[in-house]
Image: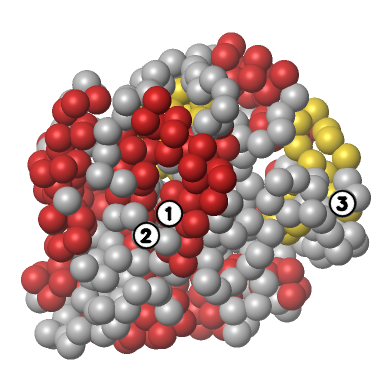
Amino acid sequence: MPVASLPNRFGSGDFGPDAYRFADAIAKAGFSIWQLLPLNPLGYGNSPYQPYSSYAMDEIYISIDLLEKEGLVSKHADYRKRSKTIDYPKVRAYRERILREAFANFREDDDYREFVSRSGWLEPYAVFRAFKQANGLRSWEEWPAAMRDYPLKREMDLAPYEEEIRYHRFLQYMVDKQWDALKAYVNKKGIEIMGDIPFYVGQDSADCWNGRPNFLLTKNGKPRFIAGVPPDYFAATGQRWGNPIYDWNYMKKDGFSFWTERIGYSRQLFDIIRLDHFRAFDTYWKIPASCPTAVVGKWVTAPGYQFFDHLFTTFPDLRIVAEDLGDLRPQVYKLRDYYNFPGMHIFQFEFDPNGENTMNTNSIVYTGTHDNATIKGWVSSMSPEQKKETQRWFRRHKIAGANLYEKMLRFVLNSEPKMAVIPMADWLYQGASSTLNRPGTVGSPNWEWRLPDAEPFEQKLPLIKTMIRESGRQ
């Protein structure tokens, strides 16, 4: 359940009362894991996989209700409370006015100063956001040379931008403070948080602007090569993501500090870390930046074993899940299994009514992820004969359920993998319009789905609790 998709009276979910209500509900039902999308600032196309930073969290998650409770803002009217989608420009504009009010009323204290002093990433990020604001939100490689190259030369006077820099420090302090409190509450309920780390960072990001030796860029900051995947099930011309490619040779010489610091910070935020696009630690698709699609490119080997050996020397207690989906070469699974990372099984991809349905025990099974249709949307795309075959399979295996969707959920819950994760839209039997992301496409309606009311989910809690208990997972 993405935080942004939670019910909320201000048009998108945040770390406020509705998140606590959701935690109470899933604890009551017997869940033990809440999986999130990345919490970093949404970048191009509102994608959580094109973030402005690997460290900062999006200010959209700051709870206005909690700001009101602290006395930092006055009482504000509801906004798009009942909307079934997130209109990011409108929601951000409404929230921005209130956040500016909170900033004007905020007084720095010891807790704030301690946060600033221990967050080495914060100052570059705040300067990046201030410069971005001053440049009409254009990408950093299009800024005036002094701003573009500030991390390299630091020759500019920041005094004209100090107020905006302070504003972004404040935002990160508030979102961090609210997240810490929410996570502590969730953990106390017996629920672990599974966070998500994008493999790549956005080209238009503080990571890239401030750490450009880690990437294959031109002198002026333009990417020489970009990331993606070749043609596959999702897209006939592949997926051209646009993220800059890492310079792994530099990273090795630098002791993998970029990745080690990034994951080290994330382990403070989450109990379990899902590594997106895990296959790129083995081999990654390298596309010339001049190519308009992802058809032209080549697979390049990454130093996966060297990196993970270093990572676990630094953080021996890390808990990692590998997103190992797609048409992968055997070496990817070998790398995964060498470190005993749980992989992922997707019910929609692996269920076969005419064959065996076996899954690896050391893994996580999903009905679906953010990148494929809801189970109701998937079933609606089946032919009449496929639906009949599927119904016959469930009858033959004596899997009970009031409808086909419930039978699918029960099958997933009762399967062999040690963890089972079911998206909220599947618990509520929502159709294809509730699909979070359509790979190979950018912009609306991707990432916009939200639940306007918690009531439908809460009404299903007795059934969900029974299903979890009968599966033996509670």
x and y, in percent, of residue 221 in the image: 78, 61
- Where residue 295 is drawn, which disc sits there? 3
* Residue type, label 1: Lys
> In which quadrant of the rendered image does the C terminus lie?
top left
Disc with the residue nearer the chain's start (3 vs 2):
3
CA separation in Å, label 3 and label 1: 32 Å
Q: Secondary structure at mark 3?
A: loop
Contact (Cβ within 8 Å) of mark 3 with mark 1: no
- Where residue 140 is drawn, which disc sits there? none
Badge 3: few (under 14), some or many (20 or more) residues near its Cα, within 10 Å?
some
Contact (Cβ within 8 Å) of mark 2 with mark 1: yes
Query: Which quarter of the picture shows residue 442?
Result: bottom right
Query: Which quarter of the picture shows residue 282?
Result: top right
Residue in the image at 71% along x and 29% along y: 328
Residue placed most toward the observer, 427 or 238: 427
**Mark 1 = which residue?**
376
Evaluate whether residue 391 shows in this view: yes
Tell me: residue 16, above or below residue 472.
below
Evaluate whether residue 150 shows in this view: no
Query: Which quarter of the picture shows residue 224?
Result: bottom right
**Mark 2 = which residue?**
430
Residue in the image at 10% along x and 70% along y: 70
x and y, in percent, of residue 256 in the image: 63, 31
* Residue type, label 2: Gln
